Amino acid sequence: MSEANGYDKSKYGYIFNIQRYSVHDGPGIRTIVFLKGCPLKCQWCANPESQLLQPELAFNNNKCIGTKDCQYCFKVCAQGAIKEKENKIMVDREACNHCGECAEACPAKALTMYGNLKSVQEVLDMVEQDGNFYSRSGGGITLSGGEPILQSDFAIGLLKEAKRRRINTAIETCGYADWTKLEEVCQYVDTLLFDIKSMDAVKHKQYTGVSNDIILDNFKKLCEEFPGKSILVRTPVIPGFNDTEADILAIINFIKGNPNVKYELLAYHRLGEQKYSYIGKEYLLHGVTPLQEERILALKKLAKEKMQEV
């Protein structure tokens, strides 16, 4: 492999999941390939294991056999990152280098790794297994994450190979990326799913860790450079962050006027909350309850009406 750090980024990349038979992330039945790494740290993120670019050690305390009966992880951890706590273990996150040795040694699978290195060939061979579903439904492959463009060489490699195999392509992006990389990726994408979370720069940085300037600028460039590209703008509606009519209307007023752009609201959920404890992180929206279904439906109705207005 030609890269100095050990692998060719155009042929290999870090992924943490491949989800088959999805009907929510692009047209038709799709296979979603989740890439590691994200420049945002959204407080509601359902995939916190996606944020770190490299593989990451996870620990499920409920599966741990206990230090009285098992100490395999202690024996293999050269960093001394495995500590004892009340007959179970704990992971010293500052000492851990995510090498994965302890996960391989753990008989109970209490220690596991989020993410592994895969080749373009390996991924597309798995994706192509569902080719019959794609041809019948108009589906294909969707790159998600994390932020796929953070691994732009690998993402382009996947998309090019998918195109060569005549597989429909889509990508989910937060929009926070170098424009030249986003532009190149889009040349191999049939459908672009683009997140716009808020037009308020202060709130955006408070809840995601970054400003929205680059995101909004990239969206404008996309509409100018790819006027025929199918773009679906999506907004996760988060209680206390962007759940008012004014929040949604501000986004609609920004994206309206582009005939190739559609808009969708996504309801907030807490399905990924437990994973935060597995990787030693705190879920900052703990206790925040999803909006009532009636409220979400009302906002969706508003969005549909306003997007149809000339």
Image (cartoon, helix red, strand yellow):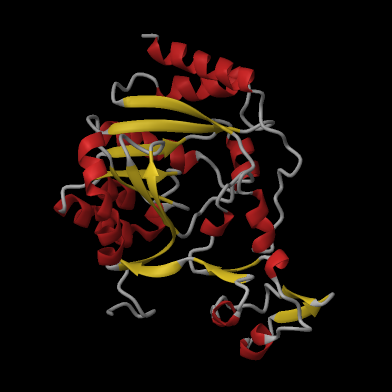
Residue 49 spot, x, y in % from top left: 55, 59
Residue appearing at x 49%, y 55% in the figure: 38
Residue 11 visible in the snapshot: yes
Residue appearing at x 42%, y 25% in the figure: 263
Drawn side of residue 220 relative to residue 284, left or right: left
Residue appearing at x 49%, y 68% in the figure: 54
Q: Residue at the top extreme?
A: 310
| Relative height, residue 193 to residue 73 (above, below) | above
Residue 243 spot, x, y in % from top left: 63, 26
Where is residue 81, by image quadrant? bottom right
Of 41 and 172, nearer the camera is 172
Drawn side of residue 180 relative to residue 15, left or right: left
Drawn side of residue 228 relative to residue 292, left or right: left
Residue 278 spot, x, y in % from top left: 66, 62
Residue 10 visible in the snapshot: no
Image quarter of the N terminus: bottom left
Residue 249 spot, x, y in % from top left: 52, 19
Where is residue 287, by image quadrant? top right
